[in-house]
Every structure is written in structure tokens, then in C-alpha cells.
Amino acid sequence: MTISLIWGIVVTVCCCLWFILGIRRRQTGEPPLENGLIPYLGCALQFGANPLEFLRANQRKHGHVFTCKLMGKYVHFITDPLSYHKVLCHGKYFDWKKFHYTTSAKAFGHRSIDPSDGHTTENINDTFTKTLQGDALSSLSKTMMENLQLIIRAPAPPPAKTTAWVTEGMYSFCYRVMFEAGYLTFFGRDLTRQDAQRAVILNSLDNFKQFDKVFPALVAGLPIHVFKTAHAAREKLADGLRHEKLRGRAHVSELISLRMFRNDTLSTFDDLEKAKTHLAILWASQANTIPATFWSLFQMIRSPEAMKAATEEVNKTLENTGQKVSFEGNPICLDQKQLNDLPVLDSIIKESLRLSSASLNIRTAKEDFSLHLEDSSYNIRKDDIIALYPQLMHLDPEIYPDPLTFKYDRYLDENRKTKTTFYSNGLKLKYYYMPFGSGATICPGRLFAVHEIKQFLFLMLSYFELELVESHVKCPPLDQSRAGLGILPPLNDIEFKYKFKHL
Ligand code: HEM
């Protein structure tokens, strides 16, 4: 009885102390504040359950700018897309590296890759720009096109087989083809043992799925040791990316070879730790691309107008470049200019990503400062987080009428060229499409990502006849458990049929 009473008093005193000292009070000039009811978590549970609805509700209650406590952090959400460019003008007050570097270290198991922590001298962002864009992009895209055809044409089918339909889950198909082609494109080919290599990559694919499944929990702060299978999968994946295993492979991408041999002579990372930073690149290059490829193929196949327009564009390009599709002959080849000049495929991909993307763009405040937006200013405290959630904009009916409907030509203008003018409140938007983030943290692989999805669609339309098993199948729901991380995968797979065309 006495012990219960003492415990009761202790708990009550703690609650009062938390209420008096632990709760942040809104100060003059700061955005409206939602502390939530649970200590430390704040509003994390409501946000995690449905970020879009949670943010819409707060927008209705507080207006376009408000602060929420999430996992002990104070996050200022800026929700008016007309203000996005103003937010990005405050770059000198933002530290965008801290969150990215800490998350990468936690999830992939390497030490900090921030040069100021002394383990590495590599400026990883320079490496990304140098090796994923400009001239490097041409060779990356060329290798990807070859690898995609190596996979989808192999083994070259005997004539009898060409007439048979193959039925498969579309998400599984996209996962298999894009993972294998992407893996070979970044980490090179073992020309001497092609069959063994295939088995190794398919095994890596299984490990990647196991690891990726727990990724949202790792980002939320849970240690990987809690997940035994995922932990083992991560270690096996990293082991496969050690330099001794990559040495001797042909066509290793510039991104990986530069990091293996030249960039970082002062690194204190051992072979396994470096392999873990390669794993971070493998994850970044696959985790969003795979669902994005699925949604692009799925939305295209289920819309007869999209299929017709895309097929016409592909056939016209093949004709203009003087290429004939055949199983035995040369693989199809498209240069940068030809890849960039596919506005219909471009629009299909953009529209598919608009509907499936749920990324959270965040920066940490380096110091107290005033955030000046279009019509008002807000005081922000050091270590607070500024967040943009572009899904609110992507599904805003004023910017995108009928926002939940897939319209393959939404990003085409009256001349069937890429459309770039979208409006909010009668004003032209600078930022209207942000699945790849924005400003200093924009995805460095975005140009390659669009190329590889375009190549995939181009090849599927060139080599195969495609059909959904159930022609009026319902669009699968998005897996909201990954909200904040990028492109959301479907909750269930969709069966489709493909067969080689009579070429
Ligand atoms: C459809 C496919 C893709 C989507 C939607 C996507 C989206 C994103 C997003 C939203 C970010 C974070 C931006 C931010 O924090 O504001 C990011 C970062 C990144 N992405 Fe992508 N990405 C895709 C494909 C790729 C590919 C193919 C690569 C190739 C390696 C890649 C490499 C990276 C890297 C290295 C980062 C981290 C950059 C940094 O922290 O400095 N991404 N991506």
C-alpha cells in the first residue's frame, strides 16, 4: 500500500515536471505548435499512421505553417508550394548533412562519412555529381541499356517459345529486372562466370528485400540488432560488395571505381566498412527506382490511350534512329539526346511518380534565425527541423485537377512537348513536381533514374506484347508504412502477361 502510494506520488511528480519543464511553449513570432500528448513521441503516432491526413488536418487548423513535436524534435512544416522557393533561399541557416549522414551510418552500419568527423576525406556529394551526371551519365545509361537487354532477351527464345504468354506478378518482374540490371550497372559484370554471377545477384536480391523491409524502422531510430534476419541480410549484402569481390569485374561504374581506387586516400574505413558505404549507394539506387518502375509500367498498361501514345513514340524513335528490334541482332541503343526526346514516356513517368511519391525533405536549423516567407516571417530555434512534404502539393486539386486520376498527358503541353507551367492561387509555381527532393539535397541520381525507367518502358514496348491478366484491375493501395522515404510500393502485386513479339 505504502509502496504503491510512493510510486503514485513519483509518477505524478514526474508528469507535473514534464508538463512544466518538458513541454515547449510557443514564443512570439513562432509558428503555431502541436506538442502532442505523449512525452518524447509528441505527434509521431498520428503522423506515422497517415502523414497526408495528419498534415491536412493541421493545415486546416493552423494555416500553411505549423510546428509539430515528432520523436523529441520540433519540426516546422511549410505546406504552401508558393513558399518553397523562399524556404530554399535560407540555405545558409540549414545543415542538411547532419540528418542524412547520421541516418546513413545508423542504417548501413558504417561510421560517420562527414569529413569533419575525421574518418574520411571524401566529399561524397562531389563524387555523386561527378559520377552520376554530365559525361558519366552517358556511360551509365549506355551500360544500363545493355544490361536490361542482357536480362530481358536472355536466353534468346527459340521460335516456339516466342508465341507463349508468360504470367508473372508485375512488381516481382520489375523488382527482378531492375535490381539485376542496376546491380550490374553499378558494380560491374563478371565476364568469366555469368551463371554463377546471376545466382549471386538473385541471392543479393533476397537479402536486399529482407533488409529494405525494416528500413523505415531503422530510420525511425530502432537498432538493426532488433531484427536478426535483416541484420544478417545486411552483412551478407555488404560482404558481396567488398573490394576483393569487385576487383576483376568488368564495366564497374565510375561512382564505385572512383571510390574504390582514388578518392579517399586518407580513409580510416576498412574493406567491410567501405563496402557498407557501397551498400548505401545500392539502396539509394534501387529502393525508389523499383516501385517507380512498377507504377510507370502499371499505369501505362492499364490506360489504353497511354499505351497507344507510348507505342507510337517508341516506334517513331526506332524508325528515326534506323533500328530494327530483333533477338539475335544488335541490342537497341539510345543516346542521351534520343532518351531526352521522349516526352510521352517522360509524362507517363512523371504522372506515375506524382501519384506514388511521399518523400519528406528536411533540413536542420544551424542557429536561431528568422524564416521569411511570401507574406510572413517565423522565428526558428537552433536544432529545429524545417520540413517540406511535397505529396500535399502533388495531390492538390487546384494545381492538379482531379488529382487522384492518372492522366498520361498531364505533363504534355498543347504541342505535345513537356509542360512546365502549373499554377496555385493564380500564380505560376516554381516548384510543382518534387519526387526527387529539392535544393541542396535533391537526388543526385534523378537523371539516371528517369533514363533507366524510360529505357525499361521502351524495351518492354519494343520486345513484348503486354496485357493485364484482369483488364479492369483495381489500382493497388500505396504502402503507407514507407511514407517519408520516397516512392511508396504497392500493397499487393498485380498479375500481368507478356510474350515476345513476332519480330
Ligand atoms: C525514381 C527513383 C528515385 C527517386 C524517387 C529518388 C528520390 C530521392 C530523394 C527524395 C532523395 C532525398 C532528397 C532529400 O533528402 O531531400 C534522394 C537521395 C539520394 N538519391 Fe535518389 N531517387 C531515385 C533514384 C536514385 C538513383 C537511381 C540513384 C543512383 C545512385 C540515387 C541516388 C541518391 C543518393 C546518393 C542520394 C543521397 C544524396 C545525399 O544524401 O547527398 N537515387 N533520392
Image: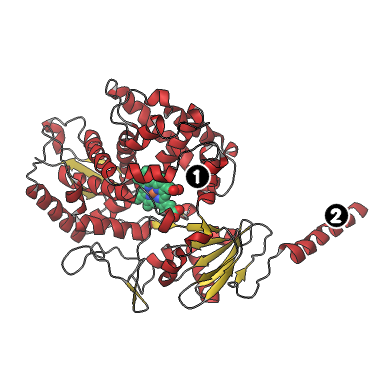
On the image, the x and y values in percent for residue 114 come to: 52, 43
Helix, strand or loop for disc 2? helix
**In the rendered view of the protein, which quadrant contains the C terminus?**
top left
Q: In this view, does 435 lie to the left or right of 250?
A: right
On the image, the x and y values in percent for residue 276 come to: 48, 34
The label number, if any, that marks residue 309 in the structure image: none
Check disc 2: other Cα within 10 Å, few if <14, some if 14-19, many if 20+: few
Q: In this view, does 357 lie to the left or right of 408?
A: right
Instruction: Point out the tag, 1 or 2, that comes first from the N-terminus.
Output: 2
98 relative to 66, above or below? above
On the image, the x and y values in percent for residue 304 come to: 19, 59
- For image coordinates 24% across by 53% down, the residue present is 301
Instruction: State the residue in front, 122 or 63.
Output: 122
- For image coordinates 37% across by 78% down, the residue present is 425
**Closer to the eye: label 1 or 2:** 1
On the image, the x and y values in percent for residue 19 come to: 75, 65
244 relative to 209, above or below? above
Residue 252 seen in this snapshot: yes
Q: Name the residue under label 1.
A: 215
- Amino acid type indicated by mark 2: Trp
- For image coordinates 79% across by 64% down, the residue present is 16
Q: Is residue 83 left or right of residue 178?
A: right
- Amino acid type indicated by mark 1: Phe
Instruction: State the residue in front, 214 or 90.
Output: 90
Q: Mark 2 points at which residue?
A: 7
Cα separation, mark 1 vs mark 2, equals 38 Å
Asked whether mark 1 and ligand 1 are closer than 8 Å, the reply comes as no
360 relative to 449, above or below? below
* Figure disc tally: 2
